Image (cartoon, rainbow, N blue to C red):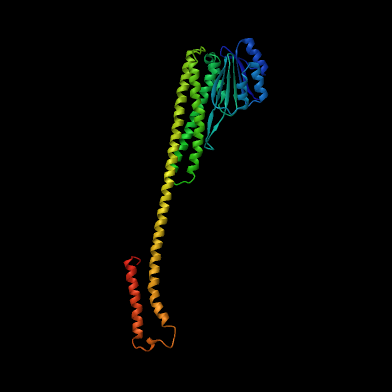
């Protein structure tokens, strides 16, 4: 059930489409051709069956079964084992989805083990079958085409991430409280994208260094260098995205701090204004308390109060109340409470 496609190629052209893996390997040996087996989320039994037939190294087989490997290139005698992390941008969800692709390359075979929807290995096969002169170059040509497809599929991801970053820059000054979370989530995607793209540069450089030693065709070497140039540009863009997001996070923190400072300033101004009002209220309360005190004393209705029989008692009491209020008014005015 995990076999998507398998075929045997002779001189760059498909000569057979076997119905089983056993028939594939038998035809490959009979015709001295190149077998290309494409697997999609295969079971452990299927991987081990292929590994036993092709004598794949057990460490590479264990990695293919376990999956969740970092991108890498490993050589076991005449065989190569390549792990890639393809990616695709989901427009509806505005997020990046990462997959995993394992490629076993031998002298007369290629096995691709895909653990996600991307990359489109079928498109790679159709491209190579339409250009037999390229497929005629052998297993290395298939590896080149797979690497080229993975790197090409990174381009829409870069465009999607660039669009998300542009939207974040617009959100920064709009006061959207969700922008911090979006910056954090996008930073995680960019870091994951860096982890997927940077190792591809090393893989291609390793293949370039070993090209002459293992007799890789000169035209294929040029094609690999072209893919290397693309992957370098993508890695640089991923690095620039991370710097932009770090700067955006710093700007967001600065804007939040400024907003908090503005809030504190407004609160301080409000508190000062309330304090001034309290001073005025307290001052007038004290001014009004003075005559109230005098009036309260003479409102006790005691019989023996000397001032009760004094003709100037009332004017003196009123004068005392006015004098006390005026004195308090001057004092509060001097201290700027009024």
Q: How many labels were placed on the picture?
A: 0
The x, y position of residue 44, in whole percent, is 66, 25
Say left or right for 294 vs 4: left
Instruction: Return the residue nearer the eye: 331 or 133.
Output: 331
**Considering only vertical position in the picture, is 22 above or below 152?**
above
Q: Is residue 30 above or below residue 236?
A: above
Image quadrant holding the N terminus, namely: top right
Q: Whole-percent x and y of residue 113?
A: 60, 24
24 or 82, nearer to the observer: 82
Q: Is residue 269 above or below residue 301?
A: above
At 42% from the left and 53% from the top, the residue drawn is 264
Q: Residue at x 44, y 26 (%)?
A: 233
Q: Nearer the viewer, residue 317 or 266?
A: 317
Looking at the figure, which quarter contains the C terminus?
bottom left
Left or right: 292 with respect to 36?
A: left
Indicate the position of residue 211 as horizontal and vertical percent values.
49, 15
From this view, report whether residue 329 is shown above or below residue 273: below
The answer, for residue 163, to whether it is visible in the render is yes
Residue at (68%, 23%) from the top-left corner? 45
Can I make out residue 169 in this image?
A: no
Q: Quadrant of residue 277?
A: bottom left
Residue in front for this viewpoint, 332 or 41 = 332
Q: Position of residue 270 (x, y in %)?
A: 41, 58
């Amino acid at each position: 059930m995990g076999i998507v496609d398998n075929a045997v190629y002779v001189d760059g052209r498909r000569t057979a489409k076997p119905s089983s893996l056993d028939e594939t390997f038998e035809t490959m040996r009979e015709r001295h051709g190149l077998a290309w087996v494409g697997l999609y989320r295969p079971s452990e039994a299927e991987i081990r069956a292929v590994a036993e037939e092709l004598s794949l190294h057990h460490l590479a087989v264990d990695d293919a079964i376990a999956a969740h490997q970092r991108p890498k290139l490993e050589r076991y005698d005449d065989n190569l084992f390549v792990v890639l992390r393809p990616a695709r941008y989901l427009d509806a969800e505005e997020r990046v989805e990462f997959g995993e692709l394992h490629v076993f390359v031998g002298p007369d075979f290629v096995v691709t083990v895909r653990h996600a929807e991307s990359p489109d290995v079928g498109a790679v096969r159709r491209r190579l079958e339409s250009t037999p002169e390229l497929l005629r170059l052998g297993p290395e040509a298939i590896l080149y085409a797979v690497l080229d497809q993975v790197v090409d599929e990174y381009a829409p991801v870069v465009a999607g991430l660039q669009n998300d970053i542009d939207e974040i820059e617009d959100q920064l000054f709009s006061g959207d409280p969700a922008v911090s979370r979006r910056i954090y989530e996008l930073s995680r995607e960019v870091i994951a994208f860096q982890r997927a793209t940077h190792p591809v540069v090393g893989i291609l450089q390793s293949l370039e260094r070993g090209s002459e030693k293992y007799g890789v065709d000169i035209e294929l070497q040029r094609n690999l260098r072209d893919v290397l140039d693309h992957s370098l540009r993508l890695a640089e863009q991923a690095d620039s995205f991370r710097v932009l997001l770090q700067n955006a996070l710093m700007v967001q923190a600065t804007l939040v701090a400024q907003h908090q400072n503005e809030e504190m300033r407004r609160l301080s101004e409000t508190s000062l204004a309330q304090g001034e009002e309290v001073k005025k209220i307290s001052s007038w309360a004290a001014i009004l308390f003075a005559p109230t005190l005098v009036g309260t004393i003479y409102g006790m209705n005691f019989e023996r109060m000397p001032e009760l029989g004094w003709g100037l008692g009332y004017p003196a009491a009123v004068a005392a109340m006015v004098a006390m209020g005026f004195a308090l008014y001057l004092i509060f005015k001097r201290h700027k409470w009024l």
